[in-house]
Image (spheres, coloured by chain):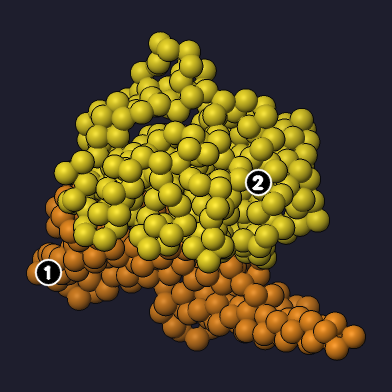
Amino acid sequence: MYGFAKMISNLINAIEFNELTLGYRDSLAVTEFSGAIKLGSLTAVVGANGSGKSTIFKGIIGALKPISGNILFASHQEIAYLPQRSELDLSFPARVFDFVSLGLWSKRGLLGRITSSDRQCIANAIEKVGLSEVLHKTIDNLSGGQMQRAMFARVIVQDANIILLDEPFNAIDANTTIDLIDQVKAWHNEKRTIMVIMHDLNLVRKYFPNMILMAQKPLAWGETSKLLTSQIPMAARCSQSSEEMESACEVNNYVAFQSIHRQYCKGKNDVSTL
Amino acid sequence: MFLLYDLLVSPFVEFGFMRRALGGAILLSIGSCPIGVFLMLRRMSLTGDAMSHAILPGVAFGFLFFGLQILPMALGGMVAGIIVALVSGLVSRLTILKEDASLASLYLISLSIGVIIVSSHGSTIDLMHVLFGSVLALNNAALILIAEIVFITLVLLFIFWRGLVAECLDPLFFRSVSKLGGVIHLIFLILVVLNLVGGFLALGTLLSVGLMILPATSARFWSSRVEIIVAISVGIGICSCLSGLLLSYYASLATGPAIILSAGVIYVASIIFGPSGILFNSRFKLTQINNKLKRKIK
């Protein structure tokens, strides 16, 4: 699955980034990204829009090939990836059951047929996320929160040891957020390696032991408790802009914070002065 | 009863050309309609239309060297269609043009080249034959070719069905679990070209896409499950062919356009009367709003 990836000899890290540069046709989105995600860790990836958070995920799943550098994986790692809801064709005529069954692709492949035990596994996952009542409904009838639950059910079915979630809590109600956070915690307890792109710094502070602040490259990377103070005003809990970020969090690493501030306020080129 | 038999069945019993036309049209519906459903779901309906024009220069080259013979024209059409699909993909990857814009540009060039070749080396009748087909003149060679195309289509659809659905529904997720995305897209484009060539034999290059798209868009109003939509679209395709042939037989209308017009009538009826159509859907929504209001009042 990961043609460009080699295996890590070190047994502590699940994913290693070595001076990774990723980009699209006419722009670089991630430059010289280096660092490692520990096996069994739960990491929030935060940063402003356009800071390269989703691009990193696309690099990990192999949808984007590195322009330079590489990504290494520990041996025997399967990846489950939950894209943003906006990437899906929500008008596609498919039932919730069929949608969740896509999670079996890695096990069944192109020609493998779904067995009765697979059906049970899919039904269990759907029950776990509280969607049993809409099992046979089509996905165009689901609310945003229900759709997100269905996407979580697909990740459950994938049963992978690396889980990547791209903005899973955006535009969903509080109850759904709590339920899905519980699922993330359950995965964490099962020692799976989880990376989640987040905007809500309150959730990050409360539930994520590790975090990465992104601005094309990791500007701050480490334990959340050291990077964010415990007091985050509700009014400024989203990291959508520099002002909110500044008032919302104090970053222990002064240099990193300065560069984030410059990145947001004066343009991306300022980061090169780091 | 006898009247109905006389009206609906006797033309096909009496005339061999009507039987062959019906057989060819039914075969085409079985192959083309499922492809049309996926064209629609992949938001590529207009791509299908462009591709149908793009096969013309290939057909014209076949005509130029071999006259109105099925195989050279069909092979020429396949080659031209695949070349245009690949070149437009290449142009969109290497330049700032999106794939739909490069395809639209290329098909216009193809169409003009095709019409110039056919009209400068043949009669107006030949041009009409190439552009609008001649379903009533389907010979055994054409029927066999259509049957082969349908067989290949059904086999490939059976193999790649789950991949097509997954790639269409959630392309980024599919890329995370499989490297087949590009292969599936290419196979799908080849299937589109193959079926357009099959359709061209009966309906001409301009109308062959009609039997793909109209039954598919009509069927979307009747179901919300892809398997059922495909089955309904095939049914609508067959009904359109049957009614189009009869319409052309009794009213002396051009057969290809009569078939597509029949599909058009079913499309309009589906927009109005389908479960997801205007009538039912708006009434359904009103009922829902009404129920919510009642609950609030309680």
**Chain at tag 1:** B
Question: Residue placed at 22% from the left, 53% from the top?
Answer: A268
Rendered location of residue B69, percent (x, y): 27, 54
Total labels: the figure holds: 2
Establish if A125 lies above or below B66.
above
Label 2 marks a residue whose chain is: A
Tell me, yes or no, if residue B157 can be seen here. Answer: no
In the structure shown, which secondary structural element does the residue marked by tag 2 occupy?
Answer: helix
Tell me whether marks 2 and 1 sit on the same chain.
Answer: no
Toward the viewer: B223 or B116? Answer: B223
Q: Which residue is mark 1?
A: B116
The residue sitting at 85% across, 88% down in the picture is B297
Viewer-side label of 2, 1: 2
Q: Give the residue number, with chain letter if any, for mark 2.
A: A181
Say which quadrant the C terminus of chain B sits in: bottom right
Q: Residue at x 27, y 73 (%)?
A: B128
Q: Amino acid at mark 1?
A: Ile
Name the spot of residue A129 as percent of width and height, x first: 73, 47
Chain B, which colour? orange
Name the foreground residue: A233 vs A121. Answer: A233
Horizontally, residue A1 falls left or right of residue A109, namely left
Question: Label 2 is placed on what type of residue?
Answer: Ile
Q: Residue furthest left?
A: B120
Q: Which chain corresponds to the colour yellow?
A: A
In the image, farthest residue toward the right: B298
